[in-house]
Image: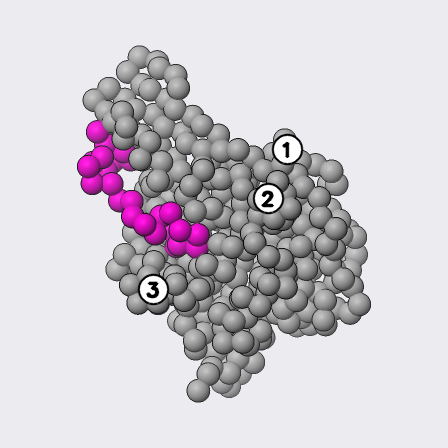
Amino acid sequence: MTESGGTTTITTLAPTSQTGSSTDTPTSTSSSSTGATTADEATSDTATAGTTMNDGPKLDLPDGETDTGGLGGCKKADFLFVVDASGSMSNEQASLVASFPGFIATITRTLSASDYHIMAVSTDDGMNTGVNSQCMMGGLCTCTPAPTCCEISCESGTTCNGAPCDDLPIGPCDYKYGSGRLFDAGGKSCMLAADRRYMLATQPDIADTFGCIADVGTYGSGDEKPMLAAIKAVSDAQNGPGACNEGFLRDDAILVLTFITDEEDDVGDMNNGSPGGPQQWYEAMVAAKGGDPEAVVVLGLVGDSNLPGGVCLPDVDPNMNGNGAEAAPRLQSFVGMFPNGVLGSVCAPEYTPFFIDAVDVIDLACDNFEPPR
């Protein structure tokens, strides 16, 4: 804690996870079953796992025209973004937000689906995070990561991020893995319609609103659990009546899971990481869609220094170098298990090409989707 004039500053960095080792590596018997990445694919910044890409992204449609994707197919799509909130993710979060307008515009004019749910979650449960808090004279405090940081700020303040300390916008959902975000990291309300924890396609200023919910900040827990967050986000416990994400996941929609992290999800990493492994994560996601793996599209932006043509430099600790990333063979294996899986490099200079290419995979999954009867 430091004091300067009338300002009190509290900065606490969350413990960083130590780089662990893992013997799990993606198998590579065939691309249709394993999602193996070839050197050519890795060099192009994206690798398609278990999916045959079409001739290219559909970007040549005249204004006002829509590719309906043929007859039938999905009419709804649920987009879940899992964003690493640890201290090394500032550049990557900015790239994700910058790529979203082009991604959603291409989705809108390509997919037959026009009914979207879009939700962002962080890789922690609001516990054991770092805190950056400043309180001015009169007890006016600001802090990050919001909203849970306000519990600390209000120990010495009267307001936090504009909210009275005796009426903070904090509830049980803010301390659960997989809860959709309502605020950006600095406490600004994302103004989600009807106080849902996800956006609809009708959300005003959808690109700007995504920039708000995807701003999870960099003071999150160093014990990242992206797969646990993803699984919880689509669980019955989080989507049932009265639950935090009530109504987000729909039986008659395809699920598009995007996760972005610069570290491996490894429970062997000082006992951190999500429980289980790639097979258990895969089974949980497929179960959430009624046992239909074709109803799930998985887009993974991870460390790829272990792959031929990988963009990330080898042996670079992301906690020491903001442009580095830990190789993530377990997460790569998880993506490769899905027939509609796309693997990209978190170290790519921009993510727009990755997302534009991924639209073809989403479009194919949408065309082939058969809603449960």
Q: In which quarter of the image is residue 143?
A: top left
User: Is the C-beta separation of discs 1 and 2 under 8 Å?
Assistant: no
- Element carrying mark 2: loop
The answer to which of 166 and 74 lies nearer the viewer is 166
From the viewer's perspective, tell me whether residue 310 is left or right of residue 125.
Answer: right
Instruction: Answer above or below: position of 41 versus 273.
Output: below
Tell me if mark 3 has few (under 14), some (14-19) or many (20+) residues whose alpha carbon lies within 10 angstroms of its own: some
Q: Which of marks 3 and 2 is nearer the N terminus?
A: 3
Residue, disc 1: 321
Foreground: disc 3 or disc 1: 3
Residue for badge 3? 246
Q: Distance between the residues labelled 3 and 1?
A: 39 Å
Q: Residue at x 44, y 64 (%)?
A: 235
- How crowded pointer 2 is (Cα within 10 Å; few <14, some 14-19, many 20+) is rated as few
Query: The magenta stretch spans which residues?
Result: 158-181
Q: Give the residue number, with chain letter if any, for mark 2.
A: 271
Question: Hey, what amino acid is under mark 1?
Answer: Asn
**Three-letter residue code for mark 3:** Glu
Query: Residue 14 has which mark?
Result: none
